[in-house]
Amino acid sequence: MRQPIVNKKVILKQYPDGKLVADRDLKVEEERIDLDSLTLEPDEVAVQTEAFSVDAFVRTMLIPGAFHGHTEPGQCLIALGYGTVVKAGSNEAYKVGSRVQGLMQVATISKVKKSPNVMSPASLPGVKPSLSLGLFGISGLSAYFGVFHAAPKGPCKGETAVISAAAGAVGVIAAQMCKLAGARVVGIAGGPEKKKFLLEELGLDGAVDYKDSTKPLAEQLKEQCPDGIDFFFDNVGGETLDEVLDQINQGSRIVICGAISQYDTGNMYKKGGSQGPSNYMKLAETSSSMSGMMVGHFLASPVNLARSVSYLMWHYYRGNLKPYEHIEVGLDSFGKSMEIMFSGGHIGRLVVDVTGDLAK
Ligand SMILES: NC(=O)c1ccc[n+]([C@@H]2O[C@H](COP(=O)([O-])OP(=O)(O)OC[C@H]3O[C@@H](n4cnc5c(N)ncnc54)[C@H](OP(=O)(O)O)[C@@H]3O)[C@@H](O)[C@H]2O)c1
C-alpha cells in the first residue's frame, strides 16, 4: 500500500482584469491523493509531473472565448509538460513507469486523457528531456514552420530578416534559423541585457531595444536595417508590427506567429480589442505578403513532422542551433513565471521545474 501524496494544483481564482497578477488571479491548492484508491477512466493516466513550459497560450486560455479553449475560475491551469505515469486506466497504452508529454493540468499529479496531444517525449541521445518543451517541442517547431513554410518564401541569403521577442523561446530559435538561411538578422527585444545577448551570444547582425526610451523603435529599426526589411517573424504584434510594416521592401514576407503585446491587456478577444496594423496598405504598395501560422496545423502532416525534427536534430548535433532555457523551481513558481513572461525576465524557453531535478 502506497502512502498518500500531496498534490499541488495551480488554480484560476478569477479571470485577470487586464494584466495577470499571479497572487490575485491564481492560487495553489493542495490535496492529499491516495494513488491506490484514485479512480481513472479506462483511457486516462495519472502523471507525476516533472516540468512544464510557460507558454504564451496559457495566458490566452485565461480569457473567455479563447480560440483554443479556456480555463474557467476554479479550474486547474493547462500547460505543456512531461512526467512519469504513476497509475494507468485499463485501456491505456501508457503503462506505469512510462514517460509522457503533452497538455496537462498544472499539478504535481495530473490526470491525462488519451489524445493526439499526449505522446512519449522525444528521447534523443544527448538531449535533456526539458528540450522536448523547447527546441524539440513547441518553440523549435513553431520557429521552423514560421521561418521556412508559413510564407511564400523564407528568408534568403543577403536579405534582412527581423525577429520580434527575439530573446524569447520561439524568437531565439527563429533568429538562429534565419542566420542559418544566410540572412542578415536583426532581433528586437526589451532591455540592454537582451540586446547584448542578441549581439554577443547569438551573433546577430543587429539588435533593437524597444524599451529604450532615448530612441524610438522606428529610428532604431532604420539604423539597424538600412536596406529595409525583407522578412519579419513577428511574435509581438501591436506597435512593433506597425513600425516594421513601415520599413518593408518590395516582395517582403511577414509571418504572424503571435502577438504577445495584446495577450495581457484583457481586450484580446473583444471586438476591436486588439491593436492591429494601421500600416497594412504597405503590403499592397510593396507587393508583400502577411501569413499567419499555427504550429498544430503544420504538424498534422507526418511529412512535416519528419522534416522539421530532422532539421532540428541536424543543426542541434552540429552546434548550429543552441537551446536556451530559464528555469524556475517548484510548482508554486508557475504563476510568477507567467508574470516573468510578460515582463520579459527570461531568455529562451521558460521552464518550471516541478521536482527540482533540472536545476541540479
Ligand atoms: N502560432 C503558433 O503556433 C505559436 C506557437 C507557439 C508560440 N507562439 C507565439 O510565439 C510568441 C512567443 O511565445 P513564447 O511562448 O515563445 O514566449 P517567449 O517569447 O518566451 O516570452 C514572451 C516574450 O515576449 C516579450 N514580450 C512580452 N510582453 C511584451 C509586450 N507587451 N511587447 C513586446 N514584447 C513583449 C518578452 O520579451 P522582451 O523582454 O523582449 O519584452 C518575453 O520574453 C507568442 O506570441 C506566442 O503566441 C505561436
Image: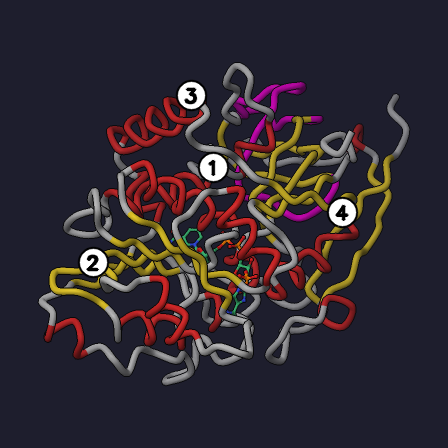
Location of residue 156 in the rendering, given as x and y in whole percent from the top left corner: 20, 45
Q: Which disc number belongs to residue 331? A: 4
The residue indicated by pointer 1 is 137
What residue is drawn where x is 45% and y is 20%? 317
* Residues at marks 3 and 4 touching, judged by CB atoms closer than 8 Å: no
Query: Does residue 287 appear left or right of residue 141 in this picture?
Result: left
For mark 1, does the 10 Å Cα neighbourhood hold few (<14), some (14 to 19), or many (20 or more) residues?
Answer: some
Q: Is mark 3 within 8 Å of ligand 1?
A: no
Q: Nearer the viewer, residue 185 or 63?
A: 185
Q: Amino acid at mark 1?
A: Gly
- Cα distance in 3D space between marks 4 and 2: 40 Å
Between marks 3 and 4 in the image, the one whose residue lies nearer the viewer: 3
Q: Which disc number belongs to residue 318? A: 3
Location of residue 344 in the rendering, given as x and y in whole percent from the top left corner: 60, 61
Residue 102 forms part of the magenta stretch: yes
Magenta segment range?
A: 86-108
Query: Does residue 264 appear left or right of residue 246 in this picture?
Result: right
Q: Nearer the viewer, residue 173 or 45?
A: 173
- Cα distance in 3D space between marks 3 and 4: 34 Å
For mark 2, does the 10 Å Cα neighbourhood hold few (<14), some (14 to 19), or many (20 or more) residues?
Answer: many
Give SS at disc 4: helix
What residue is drawn where x is 39% and y is 29%? 312
* Residues at marks 1 and 4 touching, judged by CB atoms closer than 8 Å: no
- Pointer 4 or 2: first along the chain: 2
For mark 3, does the 10 Å Cα neighbourhood hold few (<14), some (14 to 19), or many (20 or more) residues?
Answer: few
Depicted 185 relative to depicted 133: above or below = below
Between marks 1 and 3 in the image, the one whose residue lies nearer the viewer: 3
